[in-house]
Every structure is written in C-alpha cells, then in structure tokens.
Amino acid sequence: MRIQADSAILSVLKTVSLFTELDEKDLIDLASAASMSELAEGEVLFDEGDAADDIMFVMSGSIRLTCEMGDGPDIVVGYVESGDILGEMAVIDPAPRSAAARAAQPSVVLHVPSDAFNDFLSQGHPVAQKLLRGVRTMMTQRIRTLNERIEALFLIDAESGSDEEIQSMGIRLREIWATMRSGG
C-alpha cells in the first residue's frame, strides 16, 4: 500500500542517517516528492523486467532479491536490509529491473521517483547531492563485494582441484553471476 502523507514521510526521513544534514525545508521538499510502501511478508515490491522509475530506501524490514532461472527455481541474489538503498540504478540507467524484489519480512520502503530526483539534480538541490552520495556509497560497496568474490573464485587452482573444489567453483560462479545480474 502506497502512502503519500507528507507528514508521515517527513517523520520517517528524519530517522535516515543519509539525510541528517538536510535542513527542514529540504526534508519537506523530499517528503513532498516521495511516497512510502508498507509491504507484508512475501508481497512483491517489483518484478524483474518492470520499469525502473524510482530509487528506494528500505526503512524497516528486509527485501529479498531474486532472478528468474528459466525452467528452474528463481535464484536468491541477495537481501536489502533496513537502511539500504534499493533500485539505485534507476537514477542512472532507465533499463528495466534486473531482479524481482519481495518483502522477506514486513517492510516499509520509501520511494523517490526518478523524475523527482532529476528535478532535484537540475535545480542543484541539496537532496540530489545526498542521494548521489548514497548511491555512490552503495555502488562502491557492491563493486568491492563483487571484486572479492571474483578474487576468491580465481584463487582456486582448477588443475589440482578435487571434485569438492570444482563444485565450490561452480557455486562461486553462480554467486558472481547472480551478483552481477542484480547490480549488487
């Protein structure tokens, strides 16, 4: 269920560490542009292939990210926890969502539409600077994690590896693929 009540959103924004340096006017501007979703466990936030038209902040709860595997079961590529940014690529690249997102537990998610972000950016609004810092931090963390996973994969000596090590490599390759596909 989407909530558009500026006062409720404003009170939630005041608890987000990313926005603590914004003054009241800037927070009100952001609250006016944003909406919130309350999700029950298992409820869909978005599906793989949906339009990427907003950046989201998980205010409480946990969101499970999955990718379709064709005929097989969906693969869980990660979880986005309270305080994390979700869908940050929407402000950079409007390509469709690369994963599906479902509430792993009851969750509250703040939505900032891409159009509102672009308006903040073109105005040089302090909100745009804060959002960009948050996106930069999240993307940097995800790239570092991906680099660590790739490094761990290549530490395996496949020539002298046992069946167990080769199986482990397969699992690691699947994790790397899933991470790259989810943007995480």
Image (tube, rainbow, N blue to C red):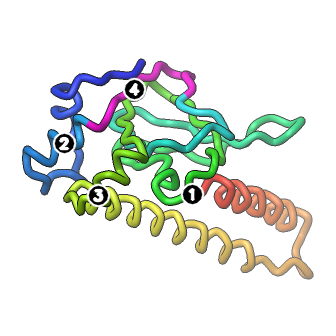
Q: Which residue lies furthest to the left in this view?
A: 24
Image quarter (top left, top right, bottom left or bottom right) of the C terminus: bottom right
- Residue stretch rendered in magenta on the structure: 33-44
Q: Name the residue under label 2.
A: 29
Amino acid type, callout 1: Gly
Determine the image quadrant of residue 167.
bottom right
- Residue nearer the viewer, 156 or 107: 107
Disc 2/disc 3 C-alpha distance (Å): 11 Å
Residue 19 falls left or right of residue 180: left
- Residue nearer the viewer, 176 or 45: 45
Q: How crowded is mark 4: few (under 14 residues within 10 Å), some or many (20 or more)?
A: some
Q: Residues within 10 Å of mark 2 (few under 14, many from 20)?
A: some
State the mark number for residue 37: 4
Residues at circles 2 and 1 in contact by the CB criterion of under 8 Å:
no
Q: Give the residue displayed 41% in from the left and 28% down from the top.
A: 107
Q: Give the residue displayed 29% in from the left and 24% down from the top.
A: 4
Disc 1/disc 4 C-alpha distance (Å): 22 Å
Disc 1/disc 3 C-alpha distance (Å): 22 Å
